Image: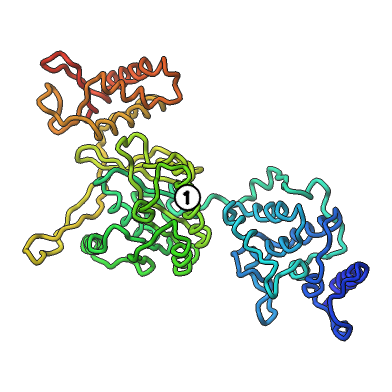
Amino acid sequence: MNLDGLELIKRTIADLEARRVKPHPPFVKSLVPDPLTLLLAGGPKESQTEVAKLQGALAHLSPDSDRGCGSFFDAGGQPDSDIWLATVWSIASLGWASGKDIAKNWSQQCPERYTEQGFEDAWNGYNKNHPNPIGIGSLYKRAMQFGWQPNQSPAPAHFIGSYKLLTSNDLRALPPVKWRLKGVLPYEGLAALYGPSASGKSFLALDLSVALAEGGNWFGVRTAQSTVIYVALEGESGFKNRVAAWELENQRPLPTNMFMVMQPFQITNVSDVDMLAATVPHDSVVIVDTLNRAAPTSDENSSKEMGEILQACKRLQVLIGGLVALIHHTGKDTTRGARGHSSFFAALDGAIEVERSNDKRSWSIAKAKDGEDGKNFPFSLKVHTLGTDSDGDEITSCTIAQAMPNIFVKTPPQGPKQQEALRKLKNAFNASGLTNFGLPLCPQGAKSMKVEDAITHLAGTMTTTPKNKRTNEARRLMTALTASSHLESTIDASGDAWCWVSI
């Protein structure tokens, strides 16, 4: 132990004795005391000097480490490199009013690892009644091993407190955003892949899972190779056939770092979440198919119950330290996106929307923090015959095939308002439009609506536009889309105007 360490211990003993707190029986004092043991008998009181001292020690401890088990040293006294949880709990042991803010500010210096819920769970997980609780002495001892000197001048006053002031140089030094699916799904967080029934979203989710496990490009988008756990709650036999079809199409087995879970699982059951997290490798991707099957008794439209679902999902995400992706449905009105309370979409760090119009399918980036929303990727389902059942009927399943976009496709509508209006109209036609029943000029199989019905529907989605202006704005947008040939129209035998999306 160096002189600085001995000086810290001497001052600690003097402070304890001054407060008449005896950390050990007299015979123990003949040994070299351990700072942790000493300070467990009574941590330093909160003061400007002690806060500055703690800040100085924290400057030598990096928050960019794994969670760890809540200890700076192992049973043999050797330093542990995973010190984040140990640091948070050491600060919590002080009982200072400013302790939580100090710990949070230190943790947030590594934004790619920090999550609000993860920090709250860690902070609240400190147990002062543990038979051998961690204390601030261990933190100081570890900081000294990294070069901290207890008697060095405290940090400048404007850096002591709940906030860290960053310069432009600090910002440039921050690490880049990490992605699982570049520009679409973050490396850590909560994501969703949603779409209407029969849109192919589960086939797409399986295809994405394999791409993540292999680390190859997916629809031309780069992935980060990951361990993937697919929680299949939609039926074992159906999922088995999907895997068989994929292996048949690709002439190879699934990657060895992709696993399936097929037992019942409820995301709102804490025990289920904890058991899954204990089974799943850290830093992995967990895909839950579907959210409805994982929360069968919850009301997705309830703010309270959706909040409970999201809290449970976030708990799972924090425990595994990776990405949790939920396969989910759209509602009856597909223009409103993912089914359920609006808090669901707001809580997502990334989202993929799957759409189907007639026989055409595509997925698009519905939400990507620091990414690019709105990109669209067409795909199709390729049917495979896997054999016959006991009745002699064919057993089939599908795989994903990237569709070639039409090289003569029209340029996108001008401006975000027209683009959003066209997207909403496409969904409306798909959900409630009538398949061509003999309208002149209307392509076979196209879905159409009366023009006035389409205007009324579009106006009803314009919640940010004043009510007295919605109908005129909807009519203006439809006129512009018709003029640019994105919408087609005709008149039926009764003189009613009909419209459909141009193919």
**Residue at the spot x=18%, y=30% of the render?**
434
User: Which residue is label 1 attached to?
Assistant: 310
Write down the quadrant of residue 492 in the picture. Answer: top left
Can residue 7 be seen by looking at this rendering?
Answer: no
Which residue is more in the foreground, 390 or 73? 390
Q: Is residue 33 above or below residue 434?
A: below
Name which residue type carries label 1: Leu
Residue found at x 13% / y 23%: 441
Q: Residue at coordinates 59% horizontally, 64% vertically from top-left? A: 66
In this view, 352 is above or below 18: above
Near-viewer residue (294 or 359): 294
Marker count (numbered): 1
* Residue 16, image x, y percentages: 88, 69
Instruction: Give the side of residue 240 with respect to residue 260, left or right.
Output: left
Q: Position of residue 14 (x, y in %)?
A: 92, 70
x, y percentage for residue 120? 61, 55
Give the quarter of the image for residue 148.
Answer: bottom right
Secondary structure at badge 1 equals helix
The N terminus, quarter of image = bottom right
Between residue 75 and residue 405, name the one nearer to us. Answer: 75
The local crowd at label 1, few if under 14, some if 14 to 19, many if 20 or more residues have their Cα within 10 Å, is: some
The answer to whether residue 456 is above or below residue 151 is: above
Going by the image, does 291 lie left or right of 68?
left
